[in-house]
Image (tube, rainbow, N blue to C red):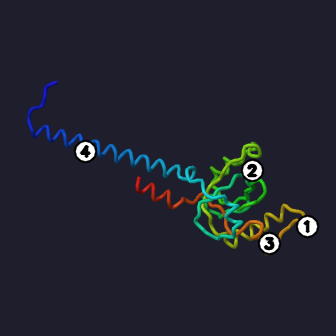
Amino acid sequence: MREVKSKQIKDIIKKSKTNLIIWLVVALCGIGITFLSVNMTSVRGGENFHELLATGEKKENKQVSIEVTEQPYVFAYYPGDSTGKFYFLWDEEYIYIAFLSQKEFDRLNTEDIKNNHLKVSGITKSIPSDIRKLALEAYNENMDKENRITSADFDSYFGVLYLDQTETDPATVVCLIVG
């Protein structure tokens, strides 16, 4: 290999190397931020959904999670909506309403979930009145007469928020754009 003697060519090569290093650093940062945003839910985890409901907070669009201990039970869906369905989810003690994708339902719908609990993360949303009505009907349909609840008791059983697993966290979107 021959040595370059021209000062102009040496300057061009030096600038190219500097630009290449800068672009490599920028590309690595972009890949890192994109990777982080894709895995944001597992990194952030979210607040425990029961603790949020127990405080009486009615904050929507908050990242929460539930450790599910029973197979989900579907009770409602919007015709033509292929993004997901409404389910009852249980942890060790409480029952929740969640909107899950088919993929997430398939992940949770295993006999092994009683022994190996699975975590579901999502964004909180206010329960619409039609879903409240359907949840109340579905719950009471499966209970004896003395264990049924009224619409006045709904908030104390299910809370005023549901977990929407299909909704994207705004912080994830920001990270994807920056990445």
Q: Secondary structure at mark 4?
A: helix
**How far apart in space, not on screen, are marks 4 and 3 (Cα)?**
65 Å
Q: Amino acid at mark 3?
A: Asp
Q: Is residue 82 visible?
A: no
Q: Secondary structure at mark 3?
A: helix
Picture quadrant of residue 178: bottom left
Q: Answer yes or no: do the residues labelled 4 and 1 have beta carbons within 8 Å?
A: no
Q: Which mark is residue 19?
A: 4
Considering the image in quadrants, where does the N terminus appear? top left
> Closest to the observer: 58 or 109?
58
Q: Amino acid at mark 1?
A: Glu
> Closest to the observer: 107 or 169?
169
Residue with the mark numbered 2: 69
Q: Amino acid at mark 4?
A: Asn
Q: Which mark is residue 153?
A: 3
Q: Which mark is residue 146?
A: 1
